[in-house]
Image (tube, rainbow, N blue to C red):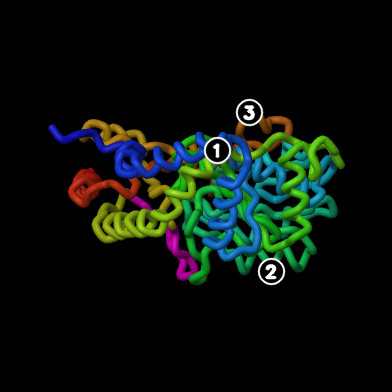
């Protein structure tokens, strides 16, 4: 019997780097630099260099990053922010936590990224910003979304939670709009040993404001200029991120190899894969397919020792949490189709070629 092939397995990677990570933890411990401090500052510098941006602000998770980005832009009650309907719900939380209202836009039926032809019809005098999501790690059409944002004088924020190291037209994402929000949740391509997130920007004013907002609205200790938050990054998380950032490109490249094996190897009319436009160089955070026969397909995989996952079974506009916004089934059909038919295949850098080949063979037999 072969071992089960899961959608994600964090253990192999963490066994490989355990000694390095533990040595870094020792340093944090010796310095008692548990919250903020130079481990966080060093990581911020490394990550802004990695994304080709001027500044990075480390925070406690990706949801906080999105929330603070909205606050730094002055977005709040009475404002609207455009968000794709097919994303992890936290994209919308950032908007809601600021007091503003998310306005959901459907995705393209082939790329599953925000449908740029459907953005303008959602813009009202209350619209302040567009949050584009690099879904599954594949960049959305940044130039086109930016053109629309500029035309209507809207802010552009990237939700790059899934896209550490993804490239748009050859450039690493994270520096296109006003700000980009990253998650370093353990399951992301760059994940901390713990919870963490970050915001990158080229704008010094936002940078300074974000530093204050995450730290109780304070620049000088015990002097509070505005109502702030405790959303600092921890030192242990930052130390683990510094180690893992060194491996990110090689891990992403391995994911790209696996994706290529899937694209080349899967030959089954019942399976549809995410269209990769020429501008996109995904980090393949997830490898999602759709199939009309989802239930049978999942049973087939499971009975062959393969455990898929689902990203995401309910689109944002149909979540109970947003029932008050009065969307109904049929409003955003492509997102709804994706939710009903998506299956995430095993995807992580430590998958062996033999395992990928087993998955491909089983899919082709379906
Ligand atoms: C993971 C994720 C987030 C939230 O990040 P957390 O660190 O889990 O708070 C936001 N948006 C997207 C698209 C994500 O995948």
Q: Nearer the viewer, mark 1 or mark 2?
A: 1
Between 34 and 146, the residue placed more toward the observer is 34
Looking at the image, tell me whether mark 3 or mark 2 is earlier in sequence order: 2
In this view, the residue farthest toward the top is 320
Q: Is residue 315 visible?
A: no
Q: Is residue 230 above or below residue 181?
A: above
Real-space CA distance between mark 3 and mark 1, rounded to the nearest whole angstrom = 45 Å
Q: Is residue 138 above or below residue 231?
A: below
Q: Quadrant of the C terminus?
A: top left
In this view, the residue farthest toward the left is 1
Looking at the image, tell me whether mark 1 or mark 2 is earlier in sequence order: 1
Q: Quadrant of the N terminus?
A: top left
Report the magenta stretch's main SS.
loop
Q: Which residue is mark 1?
A: 31
Q: Residues within 10 Å of mark 3 (few under 14, many from 20)?
A: few
Instruction: List x then y, in percent, for residue 341.
Output: 43, 41
Q: What is the quadrant of residue 303 in the picture? A: top left
Q: Find out whether residue 57 is within the magenta segment.
A: no
Q: Ligand 1 near label 3 (Cβ, under 8 Å)? A: no
Instruction: List x then y, in percent, for residue 159.
Output: 60, 51
Q: Nearer the viewer, mark 3 or mark 1?
A: 1
Residue at screen point 31% across, 39% down: 15
Real-space CA distance between mark 3 and mark 2, rounded to the nearest whole angstrom = 33 Å
Left or right of residue 341: residue 235: right
Which segment did they paint magenta?
A: 271-282
Mark 2: secondary structure: helix
Tag of residue 320: 3
Q: Which residue is mark 2?
A: 147
Real-space CA distance between mark 1 and mark 2, rounded to the nearest whole angstrom = 47 Å
């Amino acid at each position: 019997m072969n071992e089960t092939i899961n959608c994600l397995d964090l253990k192999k990677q963490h066994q490989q780097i355990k000694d390095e990570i533990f040595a870094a933890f020792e340093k944090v411990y010796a310095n008692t630099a548990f919250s903020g401090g130079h481990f966080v500052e060093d990581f911020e510098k490394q990550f802004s260099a990695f994304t080709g941006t001027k500044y990075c602000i480390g925070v406690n998770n990706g949801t906080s990053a999105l929330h603070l980005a909205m606050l730094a832009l002055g977005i709040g009650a009475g404002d609207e922010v455009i968000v794709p309907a097919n994303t992890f719900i936290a994209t919308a939380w950032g908007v809601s936590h600021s007091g503003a209202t998310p306005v959901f836009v459907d995705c393209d039926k082939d790329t599953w990224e925000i449908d740029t032809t459907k953005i303008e019809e959602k813009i009202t005098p209350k619209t302040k910003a567009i949050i584009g999501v690099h879904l599954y790690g594949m960049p959305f059409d940044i130039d086109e979304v930016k053109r629309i944002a500029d035309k209507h004088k809207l802010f552009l924020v990237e939700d790059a939670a899934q896209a550490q190291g993804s490239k748009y037209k050859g450039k690493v994402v994270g520096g296109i709009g006003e700000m980009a929000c990253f998650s370093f949740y353990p399951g992301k391509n760059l994940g901390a040993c713990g919870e963490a997130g970050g915001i990158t920007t080229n704008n010094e004013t936002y940078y300074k404001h974000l530093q204050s907002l995450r730290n109780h609205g304070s620049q000088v200790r015990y002097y509070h200029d505005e109502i702030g938050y405790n959303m600092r990054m921890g030192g242990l998380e930052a130390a683990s991120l510094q180690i893992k950032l060194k491996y990110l490109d090689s891990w992403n490249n391995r994911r790209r190899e696996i994706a290529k094996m899937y694209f080349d190897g899967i030959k089954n009319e019942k399976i549809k894969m995410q269209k990769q436009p020429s501008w996109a160089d995904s980090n393949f955070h997830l490898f999602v397919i759709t199939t009309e026969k989802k239930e049978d397909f999942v049973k087939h995989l499971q009975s062959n020792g393969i455990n898929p996952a689902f990203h995401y079974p309910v689109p944002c506009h149909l979540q109970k949490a947003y029932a008050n916004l009065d969307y109904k089934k049929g409003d955003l059909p492509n997102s709804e189709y994706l939710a009903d038919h998506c299956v995430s295949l095993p995807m992580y850098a430590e998958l062996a070629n033999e395992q990928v080949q087993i998955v491909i063979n089983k899919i082709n037999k379906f």
